Amino acid sequence: MLDSEQVHDYLFYLQKKSKTPSQTYFKHCVYGLRFLLKSEGLPYEYLRLPSIKHEKKLPVVLSKEEVWAMLQGAKLLKHKILIGLLYGCGLRCMEARSVRLQDLDFDRKQLKIVQGKGKKDRYVPLSEH
């Protein structure tokens, strides 16, 4: 088994080397080491792994003009509907792929998302357009 000094030297090497892999690669190395410790029944303190901070980024929000330009740029009706569902209802790609006709409730102006992220069902409002 590696000792903590060897692990820290390797992690330092990953972060400081001029041809360093991406930050994602570094994160996955740390996550892999955490998994190794867990599977061996060792505490996380055994290797004193660095904490990984999550970046907080604001989402990109399109203006009304940009959304209309996207909708008008689509030639086929199914593409316009897909863009409208993705952006107007805030659907993820896999959620949009699994939309069925019976999931649309035009009377209540809502769409039922079945087994979305986290295997959860939810309702989202439909736009007037």
Image (cartoon, rainbow, N blue to C red):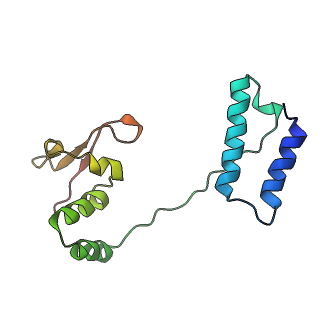
Give me the residue at 76% from left, 65% from top.
Answer: 19
Measured as percent of width and height from the top left, residue 90 is found at: 33, 55
Compared to 61, does 108 lie above or below? above
Q: Residue furthest top?
A: 41
47 with respect to 104 (left or right): right
Measured as percent of width and height from the top left, residue 60 is found at: 44, 66
Q: Nearer the viewer, residue 109 or 98?
A: 98
Measured as percent of width and height from the top left, residue 112 is found at: 23, 42
The answer to whether residue 92 is visible is no
The quarter of the rendered structure image containing the C terminus is bottom left
Give me the residue at 16% from left, 61% from top.
Answer: 128
The quarter of the rendered structure image containing the N terminus is top right
Q: Nearer the viewer, residue 42 or 122?
A: 42
Q: Nearer the viewer, residue 123 or 48?
A: 48
4 with respect to 24 (left or right): right
Report which quarter residue 80 is drawn in. Answer: bottom left
Q: Residue furthest left?
A: 107
Compared to 11, does 22 lie above or below? below
The answer to whether residue 72 is visible is yes
Q: Residue furthest right?
A: 5
How many marks on residues? 0
Give me the residue at 23% from left, 47% from top.
Answer: 99
Give me the residue at 20% from left, 54% from top.
Answer: 126
